[in-house]
Amino acid sequence: MAKFVRPALWTVGVLAAGGFVFWLLLALNIPYKSTAAPDTTPGTVPVTTPASTTVLPSGPPSEGTAYVTDVRPGPDDHSAVLHVNLPTCADAPHTQVTEAGDRIDAGVRYRPRPDPDCKQASADFPFRTAAPIGERPVIVNDAESWGLVSGGWKRCDRYVGCHPPADHCDPAYVGQLEFSAEAEFPGTTRACDQNWLVHDLQRHSGQAATRVAYRWAGSFWESFAGAKGGGCAEILAVEPKFPTALCEHLSPPG
């Protein structure tokens, strides 16, 4: 048993000696060094510099376009006169002309000036072309066509132009009648001579075609009858002079 008591007594003695030393340090007030917390540097808050605003100089005011009411002859074959409605407060009105081989685009441009009392007034603006005008149409108001014919200038049809085809069955005349009928899609011509026409109109998508009979009215096709079936009965009931050779073999519109 003695061999177990001695190590135990030795351990107790070591602990007692350590405690005595710690008590002595406290009693003598001997300072001891502790590990200081590392110094920290306060974070830097980024300062945002406001972006500078650049004021761009305003450009010149946009130009307006005068409405052309008439095109009149000029002194020679290289010239014409635009008759327009122009604001009385317009600044720097001037003609603008662009030539191509088959057309001439012309107009009167101006800078609008604010004026509560500004009114409209008529004015003439002559213009010249590099080549003779000839049969070229003059396009004004974006899409309106004028042509020089015997007797002066006239407003031309958008489909048959300033020089209409001699053939009354020409597709240009068919396009004209379809436009007048407000057809959304091209139809089908079933029969035609120079005085009479049968045409199936396709007015709206998904709807059945509508058969219409026309007579020539001097410069355009004029409708006079409609038909839901084939043959001539419905057409002859309205116009007995209609030639049966143009309708007797027609099937119903489809």
Image (tube, helix red, strand yellow):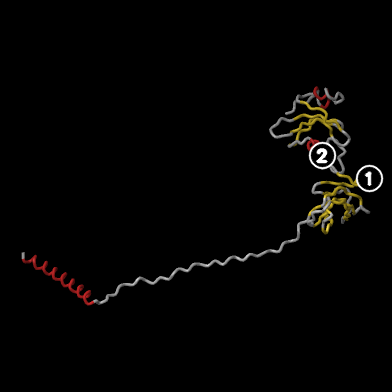
Residue ID for mark 1: 151
Residue 49 against residue 150 in the figure, above or below: below
* Location of the N terminus (image quadrant): bottom left
Which element type, helix, strand or loop, lies under badge 2? helix
Where does residue 152 sit, x and y in percent of width and height?
92, 46
Which element type, helix, strand or loop, lies under badge 1? loop
Where does residue 168 sit, x and y in percent of width and height?
85, 35
Residue type beneath disc 1: Gly
Residue type beneath disc 2: Ala
Residue in the image at 6% along x and 66% along y:
2
Using a 10 Å C-alpha cutoff, classify the residue at mark 1 as few (fewer than 14 neighbours), some (14 to 19) or many (20 or more): few
Could one spot residue 107 in this view of the protein?
Answer: no
Q: Which tag is nearer the camera, tag 1 or tag 2?
A: 1
In this view, the residue farthest toward the left is: 1
Could one spot residue 125 in this view of the protein?
Answer: yes
Residue in the image at 78% along x and 35% along y:
181
Q: In this view of the protein, which residue sits in the foreground, 97 or 123?
A: 123
Residue in the image at 92% along x and 50% along y:
73
Residue ID for mark 2: 172
Where does residue 79 sit, x and y in percent of width and height?
90, 54
